[in-house]
Amino acid sequence: MKTFHLDIDSLNYNFSYNTEETKKIQSIMQNKKDISVEDLRRISLWKLDRVLDVSEETITNLQKIATMTELKIESNLVSETLELLTNSNGIGFPMASSILKFIRPDIFPIIDVRAYRTIYGKKISSTQYTVEIYLDYVKKIYEISKRLNMEVYEVDEQLYCFDKEHNGKI
């Protein structure tokens, strides 16, 4: 392992990390006296490289999803919105499903490694998620919801807890 030596090494790199968000946060935070939890959350998301950027089309679709009374998981709007979300900067399937769950907890469960492992008996990596895998997972959640007479939004939470208790570390 190479370590930095002040007498022989130089520091002359072009540092680039979340450039636009870095500038925004620097502008907001410089000399700010009333620092809030929201400011700290924004910095935390910056550090995790979770700067979100979504299109207007994505926002429009989310608004439709929020207000539709007869929304079905198999609809083109759902698939299209999942694709738009997961193609957005900083959003993968677990984050996309979290966004959708907060908008419509009656329809969308969160997909994560723990809940997935509890249902399918195997771990899934972030590169393996697809719309089809998510929709199949949702159907399993619906089945569990119906059989146990439990709300959809509770099932993924309970599966997460089940996995944590019975399967240990991810």
Image (cartoon, rainbow, N blue to C red):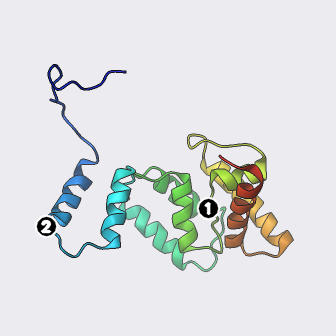
Instruction: Name which of mark 1 and mark 2 comes first in the sequence.
Output: 2
Mark number displayed over residue 151: none
Label 1 or label 2, whichever lies nearer to me, is: 2
Left/right placement of residue 98 relative to residue 164 reads: left
Q: Is residue 40 left or right of residue 61?
A: left
State which quadrant residue 5 falls in. top left
| Residue ID at (52%, 76%) | 66
Q: Nearer the viewer, residue 28 or 11?
A: 11
Decide if residue 39 is on the left or right side of residue 123.
left
Picture coordinates of residue 156 (x, y %)?
69, 64
**Residue beneath the point at 61% across and 80% down:** 69
Image spot of residue 81 (x, y percent): 51, 60
Quadrant where the N terminus lies?
top left
Q: Indicate the amino acid at tag 1.
A: Ile
- Figure quadrant of residue 79: bottom right
Observer-nearest of 37 and 88 = 37
Residue beneath disc 2: 31
Which residue is at the front of the view, 61 or 14? Answer: 14
Q: Position of residue 166 (x, y in %)?
A: 78, 54
Whether residue 52 appears in this view of the structure is: no
Q: Amino acid at mark 2?
A: Asn
Quadrant position of residue 115: bottom right
**Is disc 1 placed on a helix, strand or loop?**
loop
Residue at which label 1 appears: 110
Residue sticking out furthest to the right: 147
